Image (cartoon, rainbow, N blue to C red):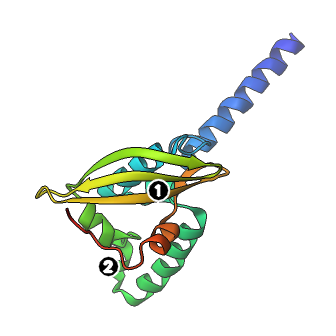
Amino acid sequence: MVLLTRSLKGVASILLAVAWCSALWGWGCKGYKTPEEAVEGFGVAMQECDEKKMKTVLTKEFWNAVEELSMNIKAMLPEEKAKTFVPLQWWCEGAKGAKWEVGTSRVKGKDAQVEVTIVDDKGKRAKYVVPVVEEDDGWKVDLIGFWKRNPGEGHKGE
C-alpha cells in the first residue's frame, strides 16, 4: 500500500510539472524541435499577433529588448491604447494574410539557417534566409542575427 501511494504521488508530481510547463510555454517545456518548426511558429505568431507565441519562438536576447522597448512605447501612449498595445504589432499587420513557405535548412551545431518565402495577399514573393539558434528550451528565431545579416532589410519582392 505504501508503495502504491508513493507511485501515485510520483505520477501526480509529473503531471503537475507537465501542466505547469504547458501553462508557461503553451506547447510544453521543450520549445520547437526543429529550425523549420521555429520559423513556421514565428509565421503563425505574427499572423495571429499572439504575444505568448512570439515570446516562445524568438530568442531570449531579442525578446528582452522587445519588452524593454515596449515599456517605453506604452509609457508614451494614451491609457486606452497602452492597454491594447502588443509588442511587434506593426509587423503583425504586414504578416496578416501572408503565406509562409518554409524551405530547407542548414544546421551547424546550435545554429541553423532556414530558407523562407513569404507571399503576400497580392502574390508578391519575398525570399529570406532566417537564422535560428538552439537555446535551452528549443529552437528560436534569431531576428538580431537576421538584421546583422540583412541590414535595412525590407520586403523585397521578386
Residue 64 placement, left or right of 45: right
The answer to whether residue 49 is visible is no
Residue drawn at (51%, 71%), measured in percent from left and top? 144
Q: Amino acid at mark 2?
A: Glu
Measured from the top left, where is residue 124 in percent x and y? 16, 60
Q: Residue furthest bottom?
A: 76
Q: Nearer the viewer, residue 127 or 30?
A: 127
Q: Residue furthest top?
A: 1
26 over 73 or under it: above or below: above
Residue where numbered disc 1 is placed: 52
- Alpha carbon separation for disc pair 2 and 1: 21 Å
148 over 75 or under it: above or below: above
Q: Nearer the viewer, residue 5 or 125?
A: 125
Measured from the top left, where is residue 17 in percent x and y? 68, 38
Q: Nearer the viewer, residue 13 or 22?
A: 22
The secondary structure type at the circle numbered 2 is helix
Residue where numbered disc 2 is placed: 80
Q: Amino acid at mark 1?
A: Lys
Position of the N terminus by quadrant: top right
Q: Residue furthest right?
A: 2
Residue 62 placement, left or right of 4: left
Q: Nearer the viewer, mark 2 or mark 1?
A: 1
Q: Nearer the viewer, residue 20 or 59?
A: 59
Q: Which label is found at residue 36?
A: none
The secondary structure type at the circle numbered 1 is helix
Quadrant of residue 74 in the image? bottom left
Position of the C terminus by quadrant: bottom left
Measured from the top left, where is residue 99 in percent x and y? 24, 50
The answer to whether residue 156 is visible is yes
Residue drawn at (19%, 55%), measured in percent from left and top? 97
